[in-house]
Image (cartoon, helix red, strand yellow):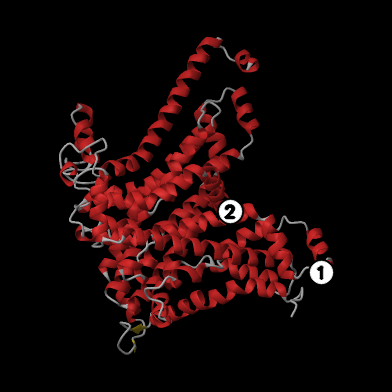
Amino acid sequence: MRLSKEKAPYLFISPFFILFAIFGAFPILFSFFLSFNQWDGLSAMQFVGFENYLLVLTDPWFWKSIKNTLVIFVLTTIPQHLIALSLAFILNSAKVKFKEFFRSAYFLPYITSSVAVSLIFMTLFGEHYGIINAVLKYVSNFPGVEMLFNLINAELPIRWLNSAKWLKPAIAILITWKFTGWNMIIYYAGIQKIPESLYEAAEVDGASLFDKFFRITLPLLKPIIFFGVTMSIIGNLRIFAEPMILTGGSGGPGQSGLTTAMYLYKTGFEWTQFGVGSSMAYILCALIVTLSLLNNKFFNKEI
Amino acid sequence: MSLISNSQDNPQESSNVKYTLQRILLYTVLVVGAIVTLFPFFYMLIIATRTRADIFTFPPPIWFGDSFIDNLNILLNKMPFFRNIFNSIVIAVSTTFMTMFFCALGGYGFAKYDFKWKSQLFFLMLGTMMIPALLRIIPWFIMMRQFGWINTFWPLIIPGIANPFGIFLMKQFMDDIPNSIIDAARIDGCSEFQIFYKMALPLSLPGLGTLGILTFLASWNRYMQPLLILQEKSMYTIPVALSKLQGKIDQNWGAQMVGTTLAIAPIIIAFVLASKQFISGITEGATKG
């Protein structure tokens, strides 16, 4: 049997549609059905209407996990994009060499496993024996630094992973460290597309480095910044491995490190509440869409 | 250069001083950034070579010790770690090759044929990318249980081998193949599949490389799905094995860091050897996708 030119394309694209029907479309519909039922996966399913949705929307831990996720999002996204933009701008400057080395070095955290780097950061964040606290203790001997610590109310040694106050910053530091390089690569690719002649013309007019950054680079990068921030929104709502490892699966003191993805996992698989978990997934989905639309609006209006 | 110095009031010397100061400032920022980025990996190696007593002293050690082999033995007592590495390799390699094949096939179908409903099907496919993965994790797990796929590698390999991102990426590369050589091959009597396999596939090697790197990385580092599916030590992938070690080796961070080192060493070595391909691959993946 010879495949005709007319039928061949349907056969070639069919693997996606078959796999999506089985592993994508069906689970999504099944999930919708489950969200109106109570089920632990073993006993008989029981129809409960909107009860699961009400349960999730009135669950203080759910709102806490949303709040945690948003706080971590703000704590990590702002430094991530500011650092990434500045590094990309500096790397693009004709004044620096070894561009390849720096680019590769910054990118390394992105390609390593989240579980592995979370474990490394657990040792760094150690309360009594961690190197971060050791360094902080050393620099706190300088008078100005001590005042700074008092200002942000930091008591040494900082209980990074064992206090509600510091757990979110700790997670944010790890995520910033891991994803800044990726953002930098994206910004760097965008900056390289800006014609050199624009900078040269600005230099002739006596523009400083700062002028060039704020008047040329930043406005022209707007679409890429939008792309990067959108990716950060989606990525942050998925954050799972980092808080899971850093809190040993517990969510930390007072659930201060419980993210939404982690809470969904616990509801579904530790407490086998498949129905409640499914309704939570739908609520999260609505949240992701809303945040993406808000981001869209903000970038169209403000900048 | 002469234009700039003529247009400024300052003499050449002071602009040279300014230039040097600027360079020092830029390099300082870059070097501090690189140190902050690389230090955790360096410190991982220090802990991996230290005894438990060394690690729990203050101030903490800042240079290598000689307990790497001891720590490795502690690790292997608790977890069949080389088996776990083997599992990760089997899953990542088979996922990568199958994904490259099926995404190239789909990309070729969309790039080089005209057929009814083509653009509708294409946008439908792209639309599915917007669905958050968390939406299907619970029913997906229930299905895998129904299939009898718990504690097997299938759920980690099969579902993603023809994914919209890969098909889209490959279509972008296949669009550039000239139609004339495809028509010529057809006249020579090649079958549709032969044209794909013998001409389109070799001509889109850069695209396949990009997709291969992205797929391998995603598979190697994946955590939530293998954590759900793999339930025996001998079946764990590296991230699952590492996370299950937590608490089991009684705060023996040395052994834990040996495991972490073994987990990320292959990726880092591959990256150092081919960092250009990695970075351009991932940039293309993000900007074309």
Q: Quadrant of the N terminus of chain A?
A: bottom right
Name the residue tied to disc 2: B209
In depth, the one of A80 and B166 nearer the eye is B166
Residue type at tag 1: Gly
Q: Percent position (x, y) of residue A99?
A: 51, 33
Answer whether residue A209 is visible to the viewer in this image.
yes
Residue type at tag 2: Gly
Relative to A300, say whether A41 is above or below: below
Q: Chain of mark 1?
A: B
Name the residue tied to disc 1: B189
Q: Percent position (x, y) of residue A180?
A: 43, 45
Name the residue rendered at 24%, 49% in the picture. B71
Mark 2 surroundings within 10 Å by alpha-carbon count, few (fewer than 14), some (14 through 19), many (20 or more): some
Q: Mark 2 or mark 1, which has the lower sequence index?
A: 1
Name the residue rendered at 33%, 68% in the picture. A265
Distance Cα–Cα, label 2 vs label 1: 29 Å
Name the residue rendered at 71%, 73% in the picture. A8
Does residue A165 appear to the left or right of A114 in the view shown?
Answer: left
